[in-house]
């Protein structure tokens, strides 16, 4: 390296250090014991210590006790071949003994024993959130209608504890006087990506009724995907007297029936248009290669004749056979799509245990696999559905899990199928420890032609087809979330 190169490198390092020092975020470098190696200018006012004081400390010594162990776990890198990044919220005690809430992003350096921590002070945001939590009655649910988050104000009103209701369907708190058609109307609104607002009669933990005026609407991520639903509620129990409660319930049912009919019609039209569009796109993609081959073969014959080079009969026959084969391929594609757009089986009585047993029978033939396939059946009962479709869906998801476990070289692979019932809805959860899905692409995995595999191993229609089968044929919902060291696919199928 020349002297000029060395001087240039020094200047670049000085410029980089100046940029880091002038950053609004606190940026530091720590080792595995959380001892500070470096802090920028912004780090000091966040914690109230001088640079010299911080360099002598461990970051963990400034945290509240309950955050230390989870933070230390984030400094354990399982796959040293990949760039590691993690994010967490912690609470630290400043030099003046005041609490400060921090959002920390942890990134591994080339030396895997050192980590860069990017720190944002979110104390004001947390304070605002705490005020909203204390005084605003709110609730979040996932795509399946299960409660994922509630405010303290909601818990105070309903007298439940978080552990009592998290994971339960929001409809499980409905008062017995409430007609189920009300909640069917809410679900139809959300399927149409519309807000729903109205009055609901619920029950507290002790069985006493309370009335709320609720507005519920879809939540979106930055990519425009619906990730769940958020509800804002007002307590109107004191405003409703016993005399008009019965008439209000009757009006609700009558209005809900009318709205459901309208929304059903709209949903069917939207579904038809969506399916037609997606089908045409898929047909276009699948037909492109055969049509190109037919065009090339025809042009070759045309070129031979145009330059007076008459091909032999064998060449003509060979070319025509190739064209015929490609035409047959196009016909096969049409038949495949026809089979896809209509359920391959008739509805029949089945049981979750029979469905899962059929899945296990298929994978039990593979003795070379080091993957442990387990099951957990909580509710076994007879119901009517397209059982072969459900088996196909589960097989497709399990195949993806097996490929992830193999691709990431997981020695003790685990795939677990869990089945249970909540509120007249059948759930299947498929968990694997295959390393999870990159958070940057997890929102894309149900899109057509998106695939993490090499092109020769697939064109990215497996999970997309699975989602369509669940939505179209079974009127269900599928979602995916990263969990621990793997991923969980969750399928909900309404039994009615």
Image: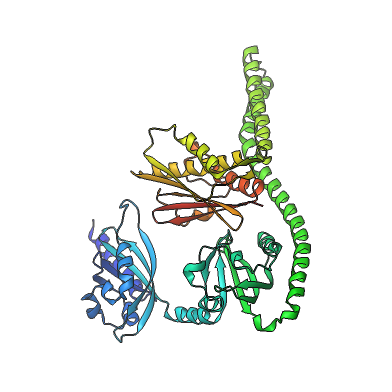
Indicate the position of residue 380 as horizontal and vertical percent values.
Answer: 54, 47
Res 122 quadrant in image: bottom left
Residue 200 vs residue 451: left or right?
A: right
Task: Give the colour scheme shown.
Answer: rainbow
Q: Give above or below for 420 relative to 105.
A: above
Can residue 14 be seen here? The reply is: no
Q: Nearer the viewer, residue 55 or 219?
A: 219
Q: Give above or below for 355 relative to 86.
A: above
Indicate the position of residue 487 as horizontal and vertical percent values.
Answer: 45, 52
Indicate the position of residue 115 as horizontal and vertical percent values.
Answer: 29, 64
- Residue at the far top in the pictured view: 313
- Residue at the far front in the pictured view: 207
Q: Nearer the viewer, residue 394 or 437?
A: 394
Q: Nearer the viewer, residue 404 or 174?
A: 174
- Residue at the far left in the pictured view: 56
Indicate the position of residue 410 as horizontal and vertical percent values.
Answer: 35, 45
Can residue 9 be seen here? The reply is: yes
Q: Nearer the viewer, residue 468 or 121?
A: 468
Q: How many marks?
A: 0
Q: Give above or below for 309 relative to 269.
A: above
Residue 281 vs residue 260: left or right?
A: left
**Quarter of the image where the N terminus is located:** bottom left
The residue lying at 72 percent from left, 54 percent from top is 270
Residue 296 vs residue 128: left or right?
A: right
């Amino acid at each position: 390296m020349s002297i000029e190169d060395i001087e240039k490198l020094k200047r670049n390092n000085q410029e980089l250090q100046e940029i880091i020092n002038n950053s609004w975020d606190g940026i530091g470098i720590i080792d595995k014991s959380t001892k500070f190696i470096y802090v920028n200018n912004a780090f000091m006012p966040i914690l109230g210590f001088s640079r010299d004081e911080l360099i002598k400390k461990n970051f963990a010594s400034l945290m509240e006790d309950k955050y230390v162990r989870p933070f230390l776990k984030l400094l354990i890198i399982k796959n040293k071949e990949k760039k590691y990044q993690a994010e967490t919220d912690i609470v630290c005690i400043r030099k003046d003994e005041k609490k400060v809430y921090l959002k920390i992003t942890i990134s591994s350096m080339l030396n895997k024993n050192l980590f860069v921590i990017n720190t944002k002070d979110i104390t004001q945001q947390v304070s605002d959130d705490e005020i909203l939590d204390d005084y605003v009655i709110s609730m979040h649910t996932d795509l399946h209608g299960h409660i994922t988050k509630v405010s303290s104000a909601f818990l105070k009103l309903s007298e439940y504890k978080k552990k009592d209701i998290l994971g339960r369907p929001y409809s499980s708190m409905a008062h017995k006087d409430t007609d189920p058609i009300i909640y069917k109307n809410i679900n139809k609104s959300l399927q149409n990506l519309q807000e729903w607002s109205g009055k609901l009669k619920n029950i507290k933990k002790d069985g006493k009724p309370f009335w709320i005026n609720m507005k519920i609407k879809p939540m979106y991520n930055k990519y425009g995907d619906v990730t769940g639903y958020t509800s804002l509620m007002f307590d109107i129990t004191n405003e409703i007297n016993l005399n008009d409660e019965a008439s209000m319930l009757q009006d609700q049912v009558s209005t809900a029936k009318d709205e459901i009919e309208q929304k059903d019609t709209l949903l069917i039209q939207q579904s038809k248009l969506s399916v037609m569009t997606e089908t045409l796109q898929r047909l276009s993609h699948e037909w492109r290669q055969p049509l190109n081959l037919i065009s090339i073969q025809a042009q070759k014959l045309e070129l031979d004749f145009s330059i007076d080079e008459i091909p032999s009969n064998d060449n003509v026959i060979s070319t025509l056979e190739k064209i015929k084969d490609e035409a047959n391929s196009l016909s096969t594609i049409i038949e495949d799509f026809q089979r896809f757009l209509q359920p391959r089986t008739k509805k029949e009585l089945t049981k979750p245990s029979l469905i899962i047993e059929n899945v296990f029978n298929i994978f039990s033939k593979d003795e070379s696999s080091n993957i442990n396939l387990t099951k957990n059946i909580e509710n076994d009962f007879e119901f009517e559905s397209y059982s072969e479709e459900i088996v196909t869906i589960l097989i497709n998801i399990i195949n993806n899990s097996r490929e992830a476990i193999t691709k990431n070289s997981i020695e003790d692979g685990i795939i677990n199928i869990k089945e249970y019932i909540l509120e007249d809805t059948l759930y299947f959860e498929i968990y694997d420890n295959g390393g999870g899905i990159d958070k940057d692409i997890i929102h894309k995995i149900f899109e057509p032609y998106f695939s993490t595999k090499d092109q020769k191993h697939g064109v990215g229609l497996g999970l997309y087809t699975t989602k369509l089968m669940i939505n179209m044929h079974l009127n269900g919902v599928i979602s995916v979330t990263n969990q621990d060291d793997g991923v969980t696919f969750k399928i909900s199928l309404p039994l009615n």
